[in-house]
Amino acid sequence: MTYAADRIEEETAYLAFHFHWGMDDILDLEHADRRRYVGQVASLVERSQA
């Protein structure tokens, strides 16, 4: 099973925007680690908007 390229681009942009990390650094993450960071950032964003 492959992970959709548009989903990877979305995750990369999201993490780059919030963490100010470069694309290579984000793409070097394991899939599970990248998804975990996305979830953590989303949680922080949601809490800040409450």
Image (spheres, rainbow, N blue to C red):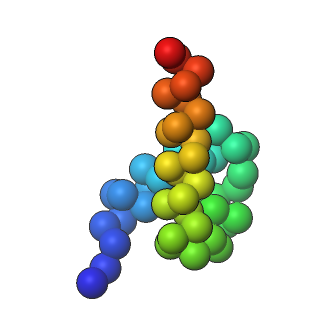
Q: Position of residue 43 (x, y in %)?
A: 52, 37
Is residue 32 toward the left or the right of residue 23 in the image? left
Res 17 visible: no
Judge by depth and name the residue closer to the eye, 21 or 35: 35
Q: Please state the total of marks drawn on the protein image.
A: 0
Is 20 located above or below residue 45 in the figure? below
Q: In which quarter of the image is the N terminus?
A: bottom left
Res 42 visible: yes
Is 33 located above or below residue 22 in the figure? below
Please report the residue visible at 49 percent of the width from the left and 27 percent of the height from the top: 46
Is 7 located above or below residue 49 in the figure? below
Judge by depth and name the residue closer to the eye, 20 or 40: 40
Please report the residue visible at 50 percent of the width from the left and 49 percent of the height from the top: 39
In which quarter of the view is residue 20 placed?
A: top right
Q: Residue furthest top?
A: 50
Q: Residue furthest bottom?
A: 1
Please report the residue visible at 58 percent of the width from the left and 67 percent of the height from the top: 33
Q: Residue furthest left?
A: 1
Q: Where is residue 40 in the image (x, y as percent from the top left)?
A: 57, 46
Please report the residue visible at 55 percent of the width from the left and 25 percent of the height from the top: 47
Q: Where is residue 29 in the image (x, y as percent from the top left)?
A: 62, 71
